[in-house]
Amino acid sequence: AWIFQGIFQNIHTYKFDIEQSQESHQKILDQLITDNYIKLSQHAQLIIDNPKIKNYQKTLSTESNEINDYLKSQWYAWNLNISIDYVAIIDGNGKRIAEANQAFTPSELQSLRRSTRLFSPRAKEKPQNFIFCESSCIQFVMEPFIFSDGHVGILTLGQNMSDLITRY
């Protein structure tokens, strides 16, 4: 009987230690996600200040070749220096104005765009932060801003969660 009680106590202690370890790891992960949200938000605010983005004038065609060219010209620097895997400018109605990203499959890109459209109504009012997982997990930050003509825009930045986890 004493042997079984000792085994039961060891199992109980082991379960408790595992739960404590999981809680500790979860707190660390939550803090990493929060810190990364702040970092991505700061990068978004710096990117938004570029006159090529700020001075966009809404026309009949929502997409902007000038902003698209700018995002694509900066894409590799942002990807290498600040690990950005996705960047998009969205208008206040959730329509994509410009976009640059790593090589997503067409279905991944379609799912990703659909998820950013879901968050864009809320992002017009305050920044949004969410994690999108399909073939990999990406943390997204959506920062609202005002174009020089007074229309609302949203800058969306995405970073692969593996970049975040490597800092852990």
Image: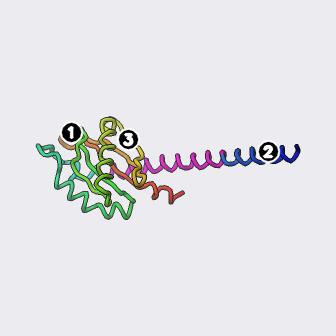
Q: Residue at x 16, y 45 (%)?
A: 62
Q: CA distance from mark 3 to mark 1?
A: 19 Å
Out of 135 and 33, give the one closest to the viewer: 135
> What is the magenta segment's predominant secondary structure?
helix
**Residue 79 belongs to the span the image colors magenta:** no
Out of 101 and 144, give the one closest to the viewer: 101
Left or right side of 79 for 70 = left
Amino acid type at circle 1 is: His
Residue 14 location (% of width, % of height)? 72, 48
Q: CA distance from mark 2 to mark 1?
A: 64 Å
**Residue 22 belongs to the span the image colors magenta:** yes
Q: Secondary structure at mark 1?
A: loop
**Circle 3/circle 2 CB separation < 8 Å:** no
Q: Which mark is residue 151?
A: 1
| Front disc: 2 or 1 | 2
Out of 52 and 27, give the one closest to the viewer: 27
Q: Residue at x 66, y 46 (%)?
A: 20
Left or right side of 119 for 69 = left
Query: Nearer the N terminus, badge 3 or badge 2?
Result: 2
Q: Quadrant of the N terminus?
A: top right
Q: Quadrant of the C terminus?
A: bottom right
The residue identified by callout 3 is: 128
Looking at the rendering, the stretch of residues picked out in magenta corresponds to: 19-46
Residue 89 location (% of width, % of height)? 26, 48
The residue identified by callout 2 is: 9
Out of 139 and 111, give the one closest to the viewer: 111
Compared to residue 121, the image places residue 17 above or below, namely below
Residue neighbourhood size for the residue with mark 3, other residues' Cα within 10 Å, grouped as few (<14), some (14–19), many (≥20):
many
Amino acid type at circle 2 is: Gln
